[in-house]
Amino acid sequence: MKNTIITKDQIQAAAQAAYEKSKDIKGGVNAHYIPYLANINPDLFGLSVTLPDGTVYNYGDTEYKFGIESVSKVPTAILVMRQQGPEAVLKNIGADATGLPFNSIYAILLENDHPSTPLVNAGAISACSMVLPAGDSDAKWKAITDNITDLCGSAPELIDELYKSESETNFNNRAISWLLKDYNRIYDDVPMSLDLYTRQCSLGITASQLSAMAATIASGGINPLTKKRIFDEVISPKITSLIATVGFYQHTGDWLYTSGIPAKSGVGGGVLGVLPGKLGIAAFAPPLDDAGNSVKAQAAVKAFVEKLHLGVFDTVNPVIQY
Ligand code: GLN
């Protein structure tokens, strides 16, 4: 197995090239089932890379606050692991791929024992129900947002209009919550757990913040911007394995096969990618493919990883020189 050395300049050049190569890609449509998201400018596009030494390379609209949506499932799964340990997530929710869309009720029926994973809607609502302290919505919300602030090194901001838009239209998620209750997989008040999930999906976040979060995961729990230890390093491989297994829903296998990077998407257009021990990357562009994954963000992340042979299955395994 050969080990190549790559420099920070090469990383910067690859990020810039990936941005330029992807910026004119057409295809995909904004999420249409959430009215707020349907109306976001589809031409917005940003790419951000954060290294463990705190260096950040930003291209395009990396300071635009978009709806974090399903990428929020990652920090809340981390929060539950921080509070109760990785085993509690495995036992109460699961760590399996569903192979089905993110909001699938069929997936729950097929596996009535567990909601499968905290990275699909069912498991994420279940994860919100597990957040401590039980029974106190305000305190739980504070824990959820403080955790995201820790991971990013800066605070997310609720997009009120998105929260309203989602709360008024989340009928499928209401069905999921009550079905899970029937299977004893909601560990707190049901409407409260669903509301926390809906609210966390409505947080505004930037691509730059998401790449810092990704880099914190890649660095074993140390935030490269604040230098603070956010979580125990045993959590990193656990959350990254969940991301690798189901991060792109029914397209996760195709994604991993073609890109080689564990990544999580959200219908707001964000993608967060983790290269363990190496770096964090995030991209944002609203138009989505049929599974709800950003078309342009996928292209950009893929181009970056490919250029430097950074894929987790790539035998080149480059070492970054500092
Ligand atoms: N809030 C969205 C939902 O529950 C999140 C879905 C996603 O980003 N894939 O449907």
Image (cartoon, rainbow, N blue to C red):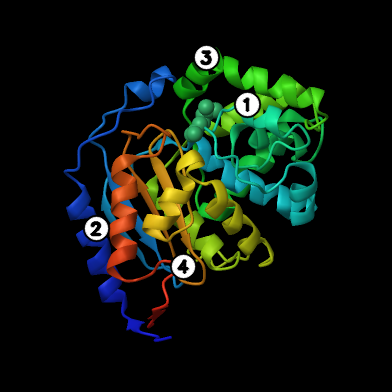
Q: Quick check: marks 1 and 3 in contact, CB under 8 Å?
A: no
The reply to whether discs 2 and 1 touch (Cβ–Cβ < 8 Å) is no
Residue 57 percent coordinates (x, y): 31, 62
Q: Quadrant of residue 102?
A: top right
- Which residue is drawn at the image coordinates 60% and 57% (left, top)? 241
Q: Which residue is mark 1?
A: 106
Name the front one of labels 4 and 1: 1
Q: Amino acid at mark 4?
A: Val
**In front: label 1 or label 3:** 1
Determine the CA span between mark 4 and mark 3. Answer: 38 Å
**Quick check: is the Cβ at mark 1 less than 8 Å away from ligand 1?**
no
Q: Amino acid at mark 3?
A: Thr
Judging by the rendered image, the residue that carries numbered circle 3 is 169
* Residue depicted at x 22% and y 60%: 16
**Label 2 CB sits under 8 Å from any ligand 1 atom:** no
From the top left corner, tell me how far across and down residue 146 is, in percent: 62, 46
Q: Secondary structure at mark 1?
A: helix
x 46%, y 28%: residue: 159
Determine whether label 3 and label 2 are within 8 Å by CB. Answer: no
Q: Which residue is mark 2?
A: 18
